[in-house]
Amino acid sequence: MNGADTAWIIVATALVLFMTLPGLALFYGGLVRSRNVLSVFMHNYAIACLMSVLWLAFGYSIAFGDGNSYWGGLDKMFLMGVDGDSLSGTLPEVLFFAFQMTFAVITPALIVGAYVERIGFGFVLLFSSLWMLLVYAPVVHWVWGGGLLADGTLFAEPVKDFAGGIVVHETAGIAALVIAFFLGARKDQTKPPHNPGMVMIGAAMLWVGWFGFNGGSQLAADGGAAMALTVTHISAATASLTWALWEKFKYGKASLVGLVTGTIAGLASITPASGFVGPVEALIIGAIAGVLCQEAVNFIRNGIKIDDTLDVFAVHGVGGIFGTIMIIFFGDGSAASQLISLAVVGAFTLVVTVVLVKICALITPLRVDEETETAGLDLPVHGERAYDFTS
């Protein structure tokens, strides 16, 4: 065990959890109407709790067990055989488990943005549970657990995905698009975000937390972690500016919500490449991401007309895929391994997500009734409201 590495990953673990709670919750919560903000908080918080328990029970073993090329098996269920003296590299294995648990929390939480304001709460819990175990955990094993895309089964050079362009952002983005497609559009899409200030605060928390997300993925307190942290910041800052500039050019005004959405686009895009590029490459990746992801938002909304409410696929999916491809040009990655891995994981995620949506919808309603949607989910579903203007 290395004490410095251990101390850094303890901090990084806290930072990644901070991304979901409260960062992502506030970011998404500010983007919806005031009558739905507590439902968004509820989705994020409940998913964080449920994924943590499921990661302990089965997810970690499926992802990082010593099974085969396709899944890790169940030998490490409930951390069987793991104690305070067990090591994973230079870290206590229980800390590696906790760090990876925060990734298993935020990945299904990202999908929340696609279905807010109209989804059934029971569906959220059931789908998120099955999806994490049957899509996310196996893909983790393929990419980071020594499985299919990393062990030479498909190609000689393992895929390069430093912190989750494929594992986190592609899978969550595709799942978000699938659910939004089957769910259908909201009845009323005309209202703007109810609290842009809340959106900015959430985005700022995500930005800070991302230092643990990418810097922690080095799994060591060294120069590689420092470089990952630095390029993460540069990409985020640059994408924020290019998003705002492109918005100003197209619409005549640069918005706060647009500026901070550009931040998230830059963060998602640098994530897979953050361990393989330097600051200049990060500048280029961020500059392109701010425009590319904004155009993807327009295409999803107005081109194929899917109501991915908070643009999960356009920002996270497109950003993660773009960053993974950039490794070919900037990070000395194999074109075959990068592109084939994107295709394999994309196809797998698409098929399994469709099946899970269909199965879960047979068990619990996919969408709330029209009266509940009109009234907002907060009071009818959870018995609470975020704001009381009468007091």
Image (cartoon, rainbow, N blue to C red):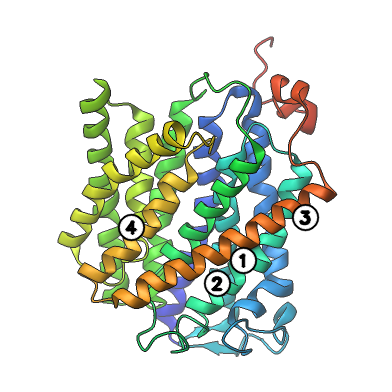
Q: State yes or no: discs 2 and 1 in contact (Cβ < 8 Å).
A: yes
Q: State yes or no: discs 1 and 3 in contact (Cβ < 8 Å).
A: no
Tell me the number on the disc at residue 322. 4
- Residue type at mark 1: give it: Val
Nearer-N-terminus badge (3/4): 4
Q: Which residue carries the number 1 mark?
A: 135
Which quarter of the figure has residue 156? bottom left
- Residue type at mark 3: give it: Ile
- Residue type at mark 2: give it: Val
Nearer-N-terminus badge (1/3): 1
Nearer-N-terminus badge (4/1): 1
Alpha-carbon distance for marks 4 and 1? Answer: 21 Å
Q: Which residue carries the number 2 mark?
A: 139
- Residue type at mark 4: give it: Phe
Nearer-N-terminus badge (4/2): 2
Callout in the foreground (3, 4): 3
Residue depicted at x 26% and y 53%: 235
> In front: 90, or 39?
39
